[in-house]
Image (spheres, rainbow, N blue to C red):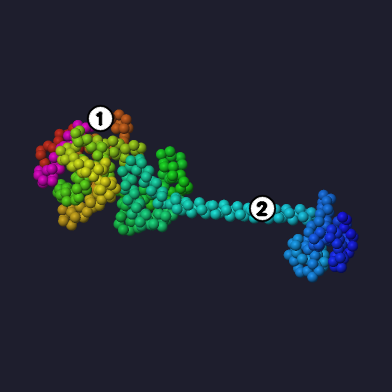
Amino acid sequence: MTAERTKLTDAEIKGAKPGRWLSDADNGRGQGVLSLRVTPNGTKRFYFRYTAPDGSRVRLPIGVYNQVGRWGNDTTDSPLTLAKARLVVTALRSEHQRPESRDIRAFRQAQEDAKREAEAEAARAKEEEAARLTREREAAEKYTLRKLLEAYVAHLKSAGKVSADNAAGIFGRNVYRDFPDLAARPASSITAKEVVAMLRKLTEQGKGRTAAKLRSYLHAAYALTLRAELDPDAPADLVRFNLTANPVAPTGTLARYNQARDRTLTEAELRAYWTAALTLPEVISSALRLALLLGGQRPAQLLRVEVSDVDLDARTITLRDGKGARKQPRIHVLPLAADAHAIVSALVTRAAALQSSLLFTLHGKRGAVVETLSSAVHGISVGMLEAKTAAAPFQMRDIRRTCETMLAAMGISSDIRAQIQSHGLGGIQAKHYDRHSYATEKANVLAAWEERLRAIVKNEKPKAANVVPLRQEAEQVA
């Protein structure tokens, strides 16, 4: 029905029948007019009627007529007096004249759509931020410094490295226990200054060697993690730590604490050491004495021996030397002379009673012995210093050096000493060409070495010739 061209009045609106359209007179072509429609249920609703750019007629609802009225919120259901409706229309005419909003309804719809899209984008951004925070929280819980170091130790163990237990002990005492907050932080957030703080605590306590070891293990753990993505030998779990730098690399190397020691024990000191070792618990005493009888073996390698590595009939014990960058441990077979055979036989019997596959064990576990052995040697050193049977402190590695020095003094050549102590065998000749087992030479030397130790323990003079040099290049110890 065509709207009637009249000047709207309250009386006219009041008397309008349902279904009618009323409107103000047009104040100018193309400016739009105020219209009113009476719905079938009697509601009287105001509209702004205008012509859109495409020529279509648009009626934009602006409110419901109410003679008393109240200033509304410019919504389609706002109660409006006739005067208020005309003010609204005046504003809409101005809006209608602007190029961007000639079609007010389409323009407002576009604005509403843009608003909804902005709100949706804000909601997505909020969800993404929440997801990011969740990932960071999970990383903080899962990819911590402690988790990285534990993964590194697991890698060492899977590679058969004897340093695994030592690294685990150093991390446990000097990182997890002493710096729990750092240990619980994401590994990627640790800084060089924080690494220095861990190292400085040790150096200030006079534990420079431990600080140097801690730095070395930390550096290796981060280096392994950084190359994990391109190193198939590295654990897959390390890739997820998302490191970009090694915080240990810029720190001081502590090289002065890594200088080679030259401490060796005299015969009298070695005799006191043996006597003290006899007073220790059985498995500790056996480990210390066997390491000595076998020519100064590395304790960590000896402690990894299992019962299956012993052949009492063939009188041999097999160690696995994983030291260095070896992918696979070097098999190191040693003959058992009389005293060593007796100790190993007793250990095999003990392991069977404990139903353990480990030759050296406390209550069926390996780790307890590894942690106790170095402490035992330290205790012996302290006791000997107090008893004035030692001129200076010594460590387990000094026992190994003492053995090689005394073997050299007996006329044992450097290549045979290397075969006994499993060191210096990584060259091309030893790796690819020398397939000789040296079983006879090692058996002769270790038998002579046992005899020499017996003489030292009993404080007897050595026989004129403990052993005939097996190679011509017998060496003298400077």
Report whether 93 appears left or right of 455: right
Report whether 105 appears left or right of 129: right
**What secondary structure is the magenta-colored segment mainly?**
helix
Secondary element at image label 1? loop
Q: Looking at the picture, how far across and down is residue 177, in whole percent?
A: 35, 56
> Which image quarter: residue 465?
top left
Q: Which residues are magenta?
A: 438-461
Which residue is depicted at the point 41% across and 39% down?
233
Can residue 340 be seen from the camera position used here? no
Image quadrant for the N terminus? bottom right
Q: Nearer the viewer, residue 104 or 460?
A: 104
Q: Residue furthest front?
A: 41
> Which image quarter: residue 108?
bottom right
Q: Which residue is mark 1?
A: 436
Q: Is residue 115 above or below residue 366?
A: below
Dot 2: few (<14), some (14–19), or many (≥20) neighbours within 10 Å?
few
Q: Is residue 348 above or below residue 11?
A: above
**Residue 82 is covered by the magenta coloring:** no
Disc 2 and disc 1: Cα gap in Å? 80 Å
Secondary element at image label 2? helix
Q: Amino acid at mark 2?
A: Glu
Q: Which residue is mark 2?
A: 117
